[in-house]
Image: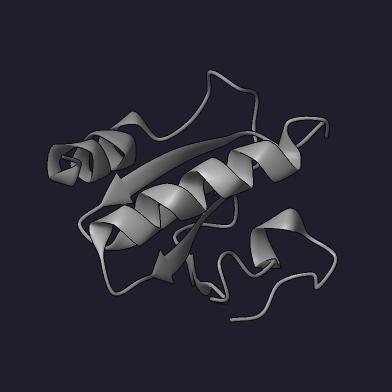
């Protein structure tokens, strides 16, 4: 799926564009896949640096194996799908 091209969640990170997965009408996963875990961690750091000054929608960040994953949810900061969060966190290193 394609999202708004002006969204920070659609920006390239370390030369990679994300794949987008719509979980529900309010939940999206943006997945960047890299050749190594080290590059995925660097992409996460880069995203944090690039967005620290913006007032962004609610999201969580994860690094799982060689993937940098952004879980975006269109609700308040504390109102997210905790079961989805737990599943992803189970795979984090």
Left or right placement of residue 20 versus residue 38 in this view: right
The quadrant the N terminus occupies is bottom right
Position of 76 relative to 68 (above/below): above
| Residue sitting at x 40%, y 35% | 81
Find residue 49 and report its horizontal and vertical position in percent.
67, 38
Left or right placement of residue 84 versus residue 60 in this view: left
Find residue 47 and report its horizontal and vertical position in percent.
61, 47
Q: Specify the quadrant of the image occupied by residue 23.
A: bottom left
| Residue sitting at x 34%, y 30% | 82
Coloration mode = one colour
| Residue sitting at x 82%, y 30% | 53
Left or right placement of residue 38 versus residue 68 in this view: left
Left or right placement of residue 90 versus residue 72 in this view: left
Q: Residue 46: in sight, yes or no?
A: yes
Residue that lies at the very extreme toward the bottom in this rendered image: 1
Along the line of sight, the residue nearer the viewer: 82 or 9: 9
Along the line of sight, the residue nearer the viewer: 55 or 45: 45
Q: Residue 70: in sight, yes or no?
A: no
């Amino acid at each position: 799926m394609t999202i708004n091209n002006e969204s920070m969640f659609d920006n390239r990170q370390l030369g990679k564009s994300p794949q987008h997965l719509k979980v529900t009408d309010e939940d999206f996963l943006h997945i960047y896949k890299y050749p190594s875990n080290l590059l995925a961690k660097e992409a996460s750091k880069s995203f944090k640096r690039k967005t620290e000054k913006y007032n962004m929608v609610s999201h969580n960040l994860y690094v799982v194996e060689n993937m940098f994953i952004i879980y975006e949810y269109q609700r308040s900061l504390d109102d997210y799908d905790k079961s989805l969060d737990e599943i992803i966190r189970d795979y984090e290193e």
